[in-house]
Amino acid sequence: MVRFIEENITKMLETKIISNSEVLYAGGDDGDTSPATKVFQDFQINDKNVGGGGGLIRSWVDSMRACSPTHLQSFNDQSSWIMRNTVRKLAMCFPTAIVSGRCREKVYSFVKLTELYYAGSHGMDIKGPEQGSRYKKKNQSLLCQPATEFLPVITEVYRKLVEKTNSIPGAKVENNKFCASVHFRCVDENKWSDLAHLVRSVLKNYPKLMLTQGRKVFEIRPIIKWDKGKALEFLLESLGYDNCTDVFPIYIGDDRTDEDAFKILRDKRQGLGILVMSFLERLVVWKQLTCGA
């Protein structure tokens, strides 16, 4: 699983375009009491605990806000605790991973679940569960870091970017270990081009690094054949699920950098990739049609 988009969901909830009772349904009426079904039933139960009125979706938003550069916080409130508990149960039934552009240690400090696979730095830093997962092989620790040689240069570029972007109010530079990020979510739109120019001026002296753009963020990464798609491939292979006809991987993302993972599933014709914004837009259209809006 990856970080979930918060801006559009929150807007939809505030304007009452969507509510959990009409959008999400967890089955179980057929008598299925398997562990997987129990997890999905928990979604429905947890929504009642949160207080209804879109509470489940809001709890997802609150839980994932820690992954937003403007909401650096850990899971403290009740809804976030409920979400963490649900994700823990999910990981007991299915191997579950968080793939993020942020450094792995930072993502773990937000989530704090030892049962998950964590792939930080756009998949360039992957570590398996520490405990609590039945998919962890005994006496084997999963660790993949294909860009270790770039650590010194990323640190150097990070420091230069901090210095260069000081003149742009709202710009935030983040060291994500195997990559660096320049967030411009809080930068005046008229300053975006100036910020891009400053970033490029730093990178022109580093031919082994490349610049990509995500959702209101510039990403500086090593030029190697590795991305979130490669990370997904590595995880499937490590779990022995590569090319399995009886395994259905699901990848949920909201950023341009997630498209590499979507492409892997599409090319393999295996599993499902969900672009959160597209999914929500279709969900809203469906609701409007069913309600006669």
Image (cartoon, rainbow, N blue to C red):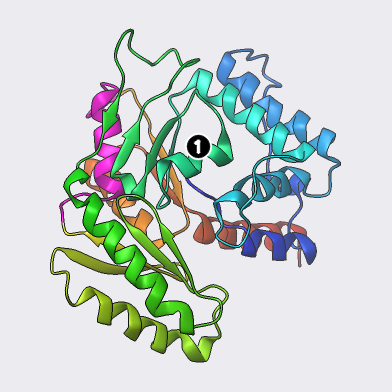
Residue where numbered disc 1 is placed:
108
From which residue to which does the magenta span run? 224-245
- Residue 96 placement: quadrant: top left
Q: Is residue 244 visible?
A: no
Q: Residue at x 43, y 51 (%)?
A: 102
Asked if residue 13 lies left or right of residue 75, the reply is: right
Above-or-below relation of 94 to 260: above
Q: Residue at x 28, y 44 (%)?
A: 124
- How far from the left and from the top, in percent, is residue 61? 66, 50
Q: Residue at x 64, y 32 (%)?
A: 84
Total marks drawn? 1
- Residue 148 placement: quadrant: top left
Label 1 packing within 10 angstroms: few (<14), some (14-19), many (20+): some
Q: Callout 1, which amino acid? A: Tyr
Above-or-below relation of 35 to 192: above
Above-or-below relation of 283 to 249: below
- Does the segment drawn in magenta span residue 230? yes
- Element class at badge 1: helix
Q: Quadrant of the C terminus?
A: bottom right
- How far from the left and from the top, in percent, is residue 31? 68, 14
Extreme residue in the top direction = 138
